[in-house]
């Protein structure tokens, strides 16, 4: 992909997978069918994603997750091409320290770092980390942080005085491999978030809303970016439930929430009401805490969001249908797809085997990547199946 901003070439799309440090299993909202997210297991997922041809992996952040930087540093030497989308949380870390960490990781991994800027949306979690800024003020702090961070990683000596940051002669001794800096990814659905994205980031990420809503967000960020003389790439965060038959996929979706009862849903939704995240509010309004109408758009299912914060929708269907829905998002301008499925190891293989072949040439994992081919087991110890 080169040393600058990674991205698809000639209309291709980037497909990422997910490292489930906050938990994994066969069902949501229960320990039944749960799976311990030990380091050997997370290593399996990362190495599978690397071998199968996923461009990179997203590592989540928050108080219920392992630290993304430590885990990415442990997984990087165990993979070859895989890129790591790692969170930086302005307000919890200084831009100069974050720049040193990013430069070090980028150099040691051979230019495989991507930065996920996270402003946070749960006041209780943020207070536990010592951050007490209200919603819009957090994005003002992100704006200042990125002004400093981009200057440092581009080789500048930075002096900055703002409401939240005071930096005098900040500098970075060792530059990152990727120039002018490791690419910046960012998500946020509020007007304040869109303004920050338009001004600073390389790729804007949305959660999996229906296509019409995604199109509106893309148009707004594009308009704002143009005011700064910039362009921004776009990505989407989705779960996937794909099976060889459509009915089997929908049955798998229902099985995923088999143990989710009304009490569990109510408890989860109560937590989401305390959040000041516009993105979480939009996710919640897709289902309103009810199972009554979870297919909110053709093959877009909101069942995950009943008990999971953040990304709460999944594309559900047979391979051809899921591929078609992905192409619909791509036609809107989405180039990066950050996907996941339960359990994450098996579903990484399933999606690669069933859907990757249908997305070529739009999806191109690169000439060095190993992609599953339909060879199968030999027949009669002599021939491959035809």
Image (cartoon, grey):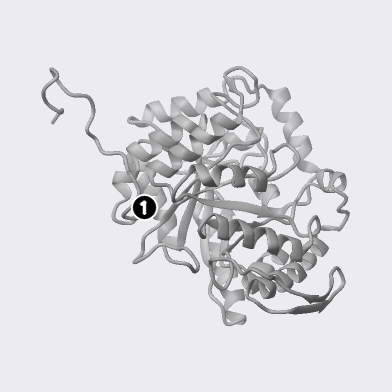
Which one is in front, 24 or 370?
Answer: 370
Secondary element under disc 1, as helix, strand or loop, is: loop
Q: Height in image: 160 above or below 185?
A: below
In the displayed structure, would residue 171 be above or below residue 298? below
Left of 377 or right of it: where is 41?
Answer: right
Q: Is residue 133 visible in the rendered structure shown here?
A: yes
Q: Quadrant of residue 153?
A: bottom right
Residue at left 61%, top 56%? Answer: 105
Q: Position of residue 56 (x, y in %)?
A: 49, 50
Q: Residues within 10 Å of mark 1 (few under 14, many from 20)?
A: many
**Which residue, given by chain and number where applicable, does mark 1 sit on?**
365
Q: Is residue 17 above or below residue 381?
A: below
Q: Is residue 358 left or right of residue 199?
A: left
User: Residue, x 65% and y 76% (percent of image)?
Assistant: 155
Q: Position of residue 54 (x, y in %)?
A: 43, 47
Residue at (84, 70) in percent of width and height: 165
Nearer to me, 287 or 350: 350
């Amino acid at each position: 992909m080169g040393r600058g901003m990674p991205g698809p070439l000639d209309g291709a799309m980037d497909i990422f997978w997910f490292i489930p440090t906050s938990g994994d299993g066969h069902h949501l909202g229960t320990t039944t069918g749960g799976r311990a997210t030990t380091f050997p297991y997370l290593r399996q997922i990362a190495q599978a994603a690397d071998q199968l041809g996923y461009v990179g992996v997203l590592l989540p952040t928050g108080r219920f997750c392992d630290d993304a930087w430590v885990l990415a540093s442990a997984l990087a030497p165990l993979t070859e091409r895989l890129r790591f989308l790692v969170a930086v949380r302005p307000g919890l870390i200084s831009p100069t320290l974050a720049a040193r960490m990013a430069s070090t990781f980028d150099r040691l991994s051979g230019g495989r770092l991507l930065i996920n800027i996270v402003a946070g949306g749960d006041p209780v979690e943020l207070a536990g980390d010592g951050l007490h800024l209200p919603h819009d003020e957090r994005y003002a702090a992100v704006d200042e942080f990125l002004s400093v961070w981009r200057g440092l990683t581009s080789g500048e000596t930075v002096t900055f005085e703002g409401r939240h940051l005071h930096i005098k002669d900040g500098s970075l001794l060792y530059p990152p491999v990727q120039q002018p800096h490791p690419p910046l990814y960012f998500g946020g659905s509020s007007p304040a978030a869109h303004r920050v994205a338009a001004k600073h980031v390389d790729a804007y990420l949305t959660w999996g809303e229906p296509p019409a809503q995604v199109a509106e967000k893309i148009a707004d960020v594009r308009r704002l970016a143009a005011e700064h003389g910039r362009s921004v790439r776009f990505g989407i965060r989705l779960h996937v439930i794909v099976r060889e038959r459509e009915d089997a996929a929908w049955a798998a979706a229902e099985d995923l929430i088999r143990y989710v009862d009304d009490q569990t849903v109510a408890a989860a939704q109560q937590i989401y009401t305390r959040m000041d995240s516009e993105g979480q509010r939009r996710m919640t309004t897709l289902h309103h805490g009810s199972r009554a109408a979870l297919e909110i758009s053709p093959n877009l299912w909101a069942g995950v969001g009943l008990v999971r914060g953040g990304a709460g929708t999944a594309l559900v269907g047979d391979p051809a249908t899921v591929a078609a829905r992905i192409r619909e998002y791509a036609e809107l301008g989405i180039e990066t797809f950050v996907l996941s499925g339960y359990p994450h190891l098996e579903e990484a293989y399933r999606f690669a085997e069933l859907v990757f072949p249908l997305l070529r040439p739009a999806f191109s994992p690169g000439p060095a990547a190993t992609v599953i081919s339909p060879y199968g087991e030999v027949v009669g110890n002599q021939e491959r199946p035809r």
